[in-house]
Amino acid sequence: MSSTLLFSFVIGYFIILLIVAYYTSRNSNNDSFFIGNRNSNWMLVAFGMIGTSLSGVTFVSVPGTVGPNAFAYFQVVIGYLIGYMIIAFVLLPLYYKLNLTSIYNYLHHRFGAVSYKTGALFFIISRTLGATARLYLVINVLQIFILKEMGVPFMVTTFVILLMILLYTFEGGVKTIVFTDTLQTTFMLLGLIACIIYIMNHLPASDTSVLAQMAERGMTKVFNTDVNSANFFLKQIIGGIFITVGMTGLDQEMMQKNISVKTLRDSQKNMMTFSITMAIVNFLFLILGGLLYLFAESNGVKSVNDDLFPTVALSHMPTALSIIFIIGLISALFPSADGALTALTSSFCIDMLGLKRRDDLDEKQKKKIRLTVHFTFAVVFFLMVVLFKIIDNKSIIDVILKIAGFTYGPLLGLFAFGIFTKRKIEDRYSLYVCLAAPMLIFLIDYGSQFVFEKFRIGYELLIYNGLLTYLGLLLISKKTPDDNYAAT
């Protein structure tokens, strides 16, 4: 199949995004960029968030996990569902009550300026690492299967993709992203469904159903009962709960879209609708994974893990399906990257630079600063994607969830301490606590393989990190009768 043909569809898709961005960003201002003027439609936000949460990692990496781990990833998805309920009924009411633009302003209300900036700093580190890992996965697929054949270097591919994202997010921010994410989620789900239908119709004839064939090969097993395994079901479910609370509820990118909805009730409807849809879509990706391994077995395809889906779609499917796959993959790429770029810009401008509080700057000057920050983060993204190419890990989803365990733990500890206690901390020491906790967790995680013969820490690493942060905050805190320090 012609690489030029596939690339032309990528360019055509991008032109559509630019048109949408042009119409949605007209008459936009800084509030449009940061929170969409608090006028976003909750149904569009819920649907668009699916694309942001799934990203290219789910599109490529989750089906690849079925071979080595069967349907064990659904244990984490169960945890996600519980986590989304906590976000909807604990965190969102708090954010709306305080009328926040940046959710880390809560830490300023509760503890002080150092805790506030510490929370924002950990978000910036977390989202930069996570978003660029996702971005690398999709860019690498495009590079290997399309652009390498055209003689385009990896760094040029990365530069062009980031330039595309920069162009359609530069003005509108959240106001634009709510609409582009909806469009991109639609294309991504169409790609998923089309590939499932094609593979089901092109497997060798059998007397048993597709699910029965998967079950015979042990692919449909969900629950892992080996307590020593990193995939033990309680570790995965509990880890999924806290990953969701950390990576969604305490993440400016995800909450930026939620608090752009006009009312708390609509925002909660958005979260619950989104959570149920997410569970269904993740299950479909696991079904697709099983189908891909059956297809690979019957057609002599040797690829596994992250390489399996792209290999089957681009080398063993008709041109029309390959085009649908590429559009679906690009649709999975853009929501995770554009939202991250916008949220990081918002957090840095509001939390680190205090742009909304700067009365000495007019709207035009603030916009100039925002655009400069936006461009700077695009450069950082470029450098990080190149770094991931050098590292070249074969299972990016594990990398992302591992990163989350280290970087979102301090955020989890800060917010938990603020919500569940009324104690006042020595604010100036909070940064040291939040730096010490992940360092200790890293040593514990690394050392556990030498201390325990079989036991491995899984995705619950985030919980241990948050707990250490919580205990550290407790050490630098004291009781106070002042109700102003109450969480609510």
Image (spheres, grey):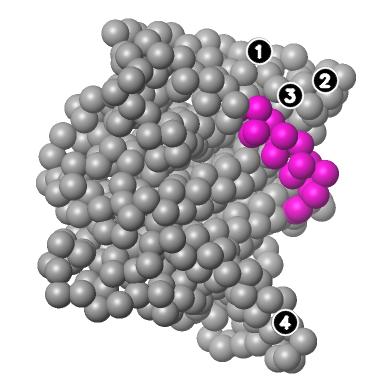
Q: Residues within 10 Å of mark 1 (few under 14, many from 20)?
A: few
- Camera-side mark, 1 or 2: 2
Nearer the observer, 482 or 2:
482
**The disc labelled 3 sits on which kind of residue?**
Thr
**Mark 1 vs 2: CB contact within 8 A:** no
Find residue 231 and report its image quarter.
bottom right
Q: Is residue 254 left or right of residue 421?
A: right
* Main SS category, magenta section: helix
Q: Residues within 10 Å of mark 4 (few under 14, many from 20)?
A: few
Circle nearer the N terminus (3, 4): 3
Span of residues in magenta: 378-394
Q: Is residue 451 left or right of residue 31?
A: right
**The disc labelled 2 sits on which kind of residue?**
Val
In the displayed structure, would residue 95 be above or below residue 262? Answer: below
Q: Residues within 10 Å of mark 3 (few under 14, many from 20)?
A: some
Report the residue at 56% width, 48% height from top. Answer: 125
SS at mark 1 in the image: helix
Q: Which mark is residue 447?
A: 4
Q: Which mark is residue 157?
A: 3
- What x and y, as percent, mark residue 109? 25, 53
- What x and y, as percent, mark residue 11? 61, 13
